[in-house]
Image: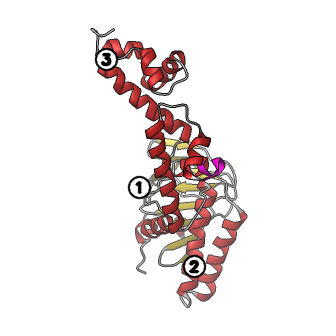
Amino acid sequence: MSSPFNHFIGQLPQEDFFGVKVYMSDNIVLFRPKTFVINVETFFEDYHFALLTSTPPPIKIGKKEYHVENSKLLIFNPGDTVTCTQYVPTQEYRAISIKKSFFEKIFEEATGKRNIMFSHISSNYTKELLNIVLNLQCEVEHFKEACPLMIQSISIQMIVQLLRDICSYPFTNYKNSLIYNDYIKKAIEYMEAYYNANITIEDICHNIHVSPYHFIRMFKANTGKTPHKYLLNIRLLKAKEMIEKGNCSVGEVARLNGFINPAHFSSVFKQAIGMPPSKYKKKYYPLSS
C-alpha cells in the first residue's frame, strides 16, 4: 500500500513489525507496538512521538545516548537517526508519525512562526493528548476514510495539544500573532532608543500599553530571551562598539550605556565577552588609555 510513511515503515524489521496495529491517514500514522526495535538504526523524515506506558530502553540519537523515565512523551525531529541499544521488557505504547509539511503548516497557523525544532527528547504528556490519540484511533478503525474532515480535525487537535504539552505555547490565531509581533517590534524600538537610560519593564509596558506579566511571557516566546536579557545585550553591543573606538574611559562607557556603575558593567562585560572591558580595550587598542 502506497503511503507517505512507507520509508519509515520499510526500515523496521518485519519480525518486529508483525502484529503491530497500524492506524493510517494521509498526514498521521499511529502504531501500537509492544516492544522497541533493538540495534536497528532508524531515520525519521517526519516528526515522531511515542506515548510511553513503561520505561523504554536506552535511546541513542546520533552518538548521544539518553535514558528516559517511565510514562513520558518521546520526541524526535525530522532528520534524527535513532537506535535503541538494548532490550528492555516494555508494555504496549502508542507511537505517532506526523508528516513534516502538515505539522509545520499547523504550527505556523497556530503561532505565526515557520520553523520548529524540539530541543529535548522527552516531556510529560496530558490526558487530553491521550484522549485525542484514542479518538483518532477510533475514527480510523471504525470509519476509515469515510469522513476525512473528521480525521483532519482530530489531526489538527493532536498537533496543537502536542505543542501545548511540549512547549507550553500561549497559542493565538495568526491574526493575533501579528499583533504580538507588533508589540515586540515597538518594545525593541523603545529599548534601542532609550537603552542608555535607566528604563524598566514598567516603562516599556507603559509605552506599548500591555501588562508586564503578559509582556514578559510574550516577548520570550517570540525572541527566546527575556526583555531584561535583550536590553542587556543591546547595552553590551553598544558598549563594545564604544570601547573599540577608543575615545572613552571604561567608566564613561558604563555611564553612557545605562549600566549602574563601572563595577557592574565590568562584571557583566567579562561574563559575556570573556574578559573585562579594560583588558578588551588594551588588547584591541594597546596605545589607548
| 120 relative position to 250: left or right | right
Q: Quadrant of the C terminus?
A: top left
Disc on the earlier residue, 1 or 3: 1
What whole-number distance in Å separates the C-alpha atoms at marks 1 and 2? 27 Å
| Residue 162 among magenta residues | no
| 15 relative position to 214: left or right | left
Q: Residue furthest bottom?
A: 146
Residue 1 position in % (x across, y down): 43, 81
Residue 38 to residue 241: above or below: below
The residue to which callout 3 is attached is: 246
For residue 153, say whether it is visible: yes
> For this rendering, which residue is in front, 214 or 68?
214
Disc on the earlier residue, 1 or 2: 1
- The segment highlighted magenta reads 210-215
**Residue occupying the point 39% across, 12% down:** 279
Name the kind of residue labelled 2 in the image: Ser
Dot 2 lies on which element?
helix
What whole-number distance in Å separates the C-alpha atoms at marks 3 and 2? 62 Å
The residue to which callout 2 is attached is: 153
Q: Can you tell which quarter of the image residue 284 is in?
A: top left
Residue 253 to residue 137: above or below: above
Q: Can you tell which quarter of the image residue 253 is in?
A: top left
Answer whether labels 1 and 2 touch (C-beta < 8 Å): no
Name the kind of residue labelled 1 in the image: Gly
| Residue 214 among magenta residues | yes
